[in-house]
Amino acid sequence: MTDLTTRYLGLYLKNPLIAASSGFTSSIEHLKSLEKNGIGAIVLKSIFEEEIINEFHDRLNSDDRFGSNIEFLDYYDYDLKEESLDKYIQLIKDAKEALSIPVIASINCVTSQEWTDFAVKLQKAGADALELNIFIMPSDTKKSGREIEEEYLKISKKINDTVSIPVAIKMSSYFSNVSEMIQNLDKTGISGLVLFNRSYSLDFDIEKMDITSSSNVLSKPEEYTLPLRWIALNSNKVNCSLAASTGIHDGKSLIKMLLAGATAVQIASVIYLHGPESINSMLTELEEWMQSKQFLNIDQFRGKLSRDEVKNPAEFERVQFMKHFSNKKM
Ligand SMILES: Cc1cc2nc3c(=O)[nH]c(=O)nc-3n(C[C@H](O)[C@H](O)[C@H](O)COP(=O)(O)O)c2cc1C
């Protein structure tokens, strides 16, 4: 019997596949279908700090009762946050009641203000863990890269110190020294890192001469090589669990992430493209591969192709197309 169990953020998972935060994880009906198809855990759709701030500004602009009454503004701001939060708390409670797999709540934050209070409320609602999707847009040219990195570390530490449930940080790959950032985030005491978040891209409509959203919302299968490299480089260097995310569309890329040293793998686009049934086929592919290699459990091969385990670790540092490739007529 092949054992697919794994531990992620200290949580017991019946298999390493996690439904990543997306629109698919925002309704109980979809969550149930993910569980029915064998998913090991789910990350709920994020509650967005930015969205609450934007809604606050929209309401202010459309209502002239406020004037400069600061107390009223504060009350309104608080009220709006509570309203969004209440809906999210209900989603956590409903998900916990409907599912038997771990439920991870997700906060998409750009500052550490107030989220510490919110994080405590999400914990009280019954979330098994918390995932923080932090992205600070580096558009302020007066702020140094180091200052922005410090913000990430501050948010991570503050929230991790506030709650008692495990905290994972979902990070982007846009750092000058990705490995240093991974290791510094690990030092804040968090339980896990998700490599990587995939950002929303904008595009231009040349007919209307306006900004539009890109059609590139879902990942392509070839994108998995980005998390693969960074997980392989860092899986032996951190204490926290690493989950892979971006471009994992089949059993083969799931196996590769485990070989790189990931303890779990998050999927979103493949569910949109091929439905929750893709979970089942990815797990079957993993199980059949393990049987063909005579592995009884994941720990027998996890990390076998991480940087510290391979014969030629220099391959992980290679980024340029050298002569080697031109010989292959490429
Ligand atoms: C439609 C859609 C909605 C998403 N919403 C969120 C979200 O609310 N919070 C979040 O952290 N990530 C969100 N993501 C990003 C996914 O969780 C995931 O990190 C990303 O899509 C890369 O994984 P994939 O290649 O398996 O799609 C969303 C992705 C999609 C496609």
Image (tube, rainbow, N blue to C red):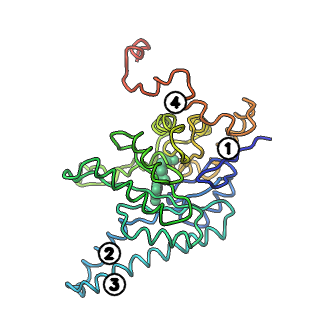
Q: Which mark is residue 307?
A: 4
- Circle 3 residues within 10 Å: few <14, some 14–19, many ≥20: few
Q: Which mark is residue 56?
A: 2
Quadrant for the N terminus in the image: top right
Q: Secondary structure at mark 4?
A: loop
**Amino acid at the residue labelled 2:** Phe
Determine if the C-beta at disc 4 is less than 8 A from ligand 1.
no
Using residue 233 as the reference point, say whether residue 51 is left or right of it: left
Ligand 1 within 8 angstroms of badge 2 C-beta: no
Determine whether the residue tagged by mark 2 lies in a helix, strand or loop.
helix
First along the sequence among labels 3 and 2: 2
Which label belongs to residue 167? none
Q: Compute the Cα span from label 3 to label 2.
A: 11 Å
Q: Is residue 66 above or below residue 45?
A: below
- Dot 2 and dot 1 residues touching (CB under 8 Å): no
The image shows a total of numbered marks equal to 4
Check disc 1 and give the amino acid type. Leu
Residues 291 and 10: in front is 10
Q: Residues within 10 Å of mark 1 (few under 14, many from 20)?
A: many
For the C terminus, the image quarter is top left
Q: Which mark is residue 283?
A: 1
CA–CA distance in space, label 4 to label 1: 25 Å
Q: Is residue 59 left or right of residue 219?
A: left
Residue 155 found in image quarter: bottom left
Q: Which mark is residue 75?
A: 3
Amino acid of disc 3: Tyr
Residue at position x 40%, y 41% from top? 180
- In the picture, measured across the screen, residue 320 lies left or right of residue 35, that is left
Determine whether the residue tagged by mark 1 lies in a helix, strand or loop: helix
Q: Earlier in the sequence, mark 3 or mark 1?
A: 3
